[in-house]
Amino acid sequence: STINHITEGNRRHIDVLYIKVASDNGTWRRYAHSYIGFGVTPEIGRELTQAQLNKANEVIISLKSFLKSKPFTIIEQVKTNEYQSIVISNIAKMSKVLGLAKDSTVNDGLFEIFALPPGKAFMLGVIVKSATVGLRYTKQTDKYVFKTVNKQPVQLDGEVFDIPANALVTVGIEQRNLACIV
């Protein structure tokens, strides 16, 4: 039982994702236990947090946010790239239905990057694939660095906030840093 796990101290240590942002406004760092999303993810998240949710309008709000989302531009290793969405995760599933990397583990010191190019038709296909067979990640790593071009929304687990334009963004992972009772 859960009480026995607590009293016996049965813990599992999992990795924690972090994002460090350096801009003209200073440097800050925030943490996430599951995922960090750019593009469509925070746009949908922001809309969902402002609504009175039920199962029907959650789907409608998500679809509307998805359809009005625009690609964003970042600079990676001096190359300018455009994406519809980037999701960085150390979990196998995002929400109850979206499958990410089947081989993802929460304590291997690595995270998976799902970088999706612009195109709503392509994104819709990705969502269907994610809900059925899961996705193949673009890259698996312990560090991802880029520079924002414009103000960029980001979502860490459930929290949505903005990163200023021209900010240096570093996403990393602290291996087995969070103790959880399992």
Image (spheres, rainbow, N blue to C red):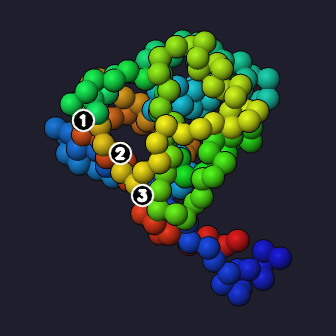
Q: Foreground residue, 3 or 131?
A: 131
Q: Tell me where residue 142 appears, x and y as whole percent.
A: 40, 54
How many marks the image carries: the answer is 3
- Mark 1 lies on residue: 77
Say which label, 1 or 2, has the lower sequence index.
1
**Residue at 49% of width from left, 51% of height from top?**
111
The amino acid type of the residue labelled 3 equals: Ile
The amino acid type of the residue labelled 2 equals: Tyr
- Mark 3 lies on residue: 173
**Residue at 41% of width from left, 30% of height from top?**
153
The amino acid type of the residue labelled 1 equals: Gln
Q: Quadrant of residue 66?
A: top right
Q: Tell me where residue 60 appears, x and y as whole percent.
A: 71, 18
Q: Foreground residue, 145 or 22?
A: 145
Residue 31 visible in image: no
Say which label, 2 or 3, has the lower sequence index.
2
- Mark 2 lies on residue: 144
Answer above or below: position of 52 versus 96.
above
Separation of disc 2 and disc 3 at Cα?
Answer: 10 Å
Q: Tell me where residue 20 appears, x and y as whole percent.
A: 31, 49
Question: Which residue is situated farthest in the bottom direction here?
Answer: 8
**Residue at 71% of width from left, 87% of height from top?**
8
Of labels 3 and 1, the one closer to you: 1
